[in-house]
Image (tube, rainbow, N blue to C red):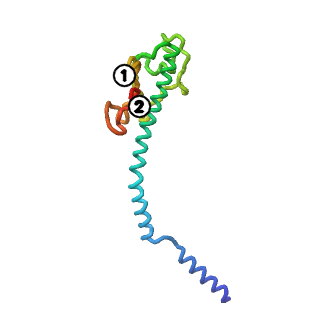
Amino acid sequence: MQISSARIGSSMTLGHSSRGFTLIELLVVLAILGLLATIVAPNVMRFLKSAKTKTAQTQIANLGGALDAFNIDVGRYPNSSEGLQALVEKPPEADNWFGPYLNKNSIPKDPWGFEYHYSAPGNHGAYDLWSLGADDREGGEGEDQDVESWE
């Protein structure tokens, strides 16, 4: 019986020492996590904002390619009244239209959820295609900056 009581005593000692973390240990871990969050979060947000701008530039380039294909087939770019919709639906006066010119048969919205702006003839070329950024207003800095086909 003495052997079994020794085992019980050692198991009670083991159970007592592995109960959990102390309050001080938890506070230290929370403080470290808080410091990491304050250092990492601004950098992640900066990369997210620049990623949306780069996505808008890529989408504008892809839409430009579709507009060029429309121009090759029809002999002109869609006018302002036809808009980008002419890339997915045949305009009434577009002979030799072989669209749709976009893979998903729909005009994508910019990364901020707004419609792209289009005018033809444009002030900067045969057409102008642009996004007004996160604020959906002309001008701006950072995420609010405009993304334009002519830049």
Most foreground residue, 125 or 91: 125
In the rendered view, would you say 50 is above or below 68?
below
Specify the quadrant that holds the C terminus. top left
Kindly report the distance in space between the C-alpha atoms of the residues bearing marks 1 and 2: 22 Å
- The residue that label 2 is drawn on is 114
- The residue that label 1 is drawn on is 124
Specify the quadrant that holds the N terminus. bottom right
Q: Residues within 10 Å of mark 1 (few under 14, many from 20)?
A: few
Disc 1 to disc 2: CB gap under 8 Å: no
What x and y, as percent, mark residue 69?
A: 52, 20
- Horizontally, residue 6 falls left or right of residue 91, namely right
What x and y, as percent, mark residue 14?
A: 57, 78
What x and y, as percent, mark residue 124?
A: 36, 22
In the rendered view, would you say 40 is above or below 104?
below
Question: Which label lies toward us, 1 or 2?
Answer: 1
Q: Earlier in the sequence, mark 1 or mark 2?
A: 2
Label 1: element kind: loop
For residue 33, which quarter of the picture?
A: bottom left
Determine the residue positioned at 66% across, 89% down.
2
The amino acid at mark 1 is His
